[in-house]
Amino acid sequence: MLRVVAVFIGAVVLMLTLFQSIAIAVGWWQGRIVSLGGGELFWLLLLPVLLAVYLRGFPFLRAGCAVCPERDECARQTARDTGP
């Protein structure tokens, strides 16, 4: 139970930091942030790291994940039915 709570809190912190980093990046891109200070530079440099953690941490984005086994079974059945 404690592990589930820790993973949930970690996911919330990841999402909040990812949103902050994206907001800084969009503001810089649109020209609303002209000069990058230490804080803005930190968030811009953290954005690729946060995206990598997000994409690595959520298995439904990877090939061969086991989150949706019924979808995989359906795909296998369809491939057998329409096979050569």
Image: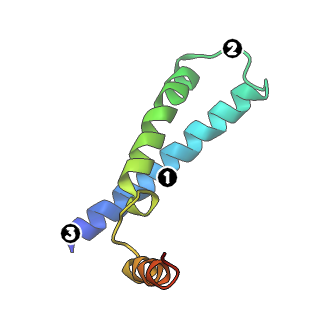
Instruction: Tell me the SS state at disc 2.
Output: loop
Residue in view at x 43 percent, y 64 percent:
60
At a point 37% along the width and 79% down the height, the residue shown is 69
Q: Name the residue under label 2.
A: 35
Residue at mark 1: 15
Residue 10 lies, in percent from the top left, at: 35, 55
Q: How crowded is mark 3: few (under 14 residues within 10 Å), some or many (20 or more)?
A: few
Q: Which of 19 and 64 is in front in this view?
A: 64
Residue 2, label in figure: 3
Task: Residue 58 in the image: state x and y as whole percent.
Answer: 40, 58
State how far apart marks 3 and 1 are (Cα). Answer: 20 Å
**Mark positioned earlier in the residue sequence (1 or 2):** 1
Gap between marks 2 and 3, in whole Å?
Answer: 43 Å
Q: In front of the other: label 1 or label 2?
A: 1
Label 3 element class: helix
> How many neighbours does mark 1 have within 10 angstroms: few (below 14), some (14-19), or many (20 or more)?
some
Q: Residue at x 40, y 59 (%)?
A: 63
Amino acid on which the number 1 mark rests in the picture: Met
The residue closer to the viewer here, 16 or 62, is 62
* Callouts 2 and 3 close, C-beta under 8 Å: no
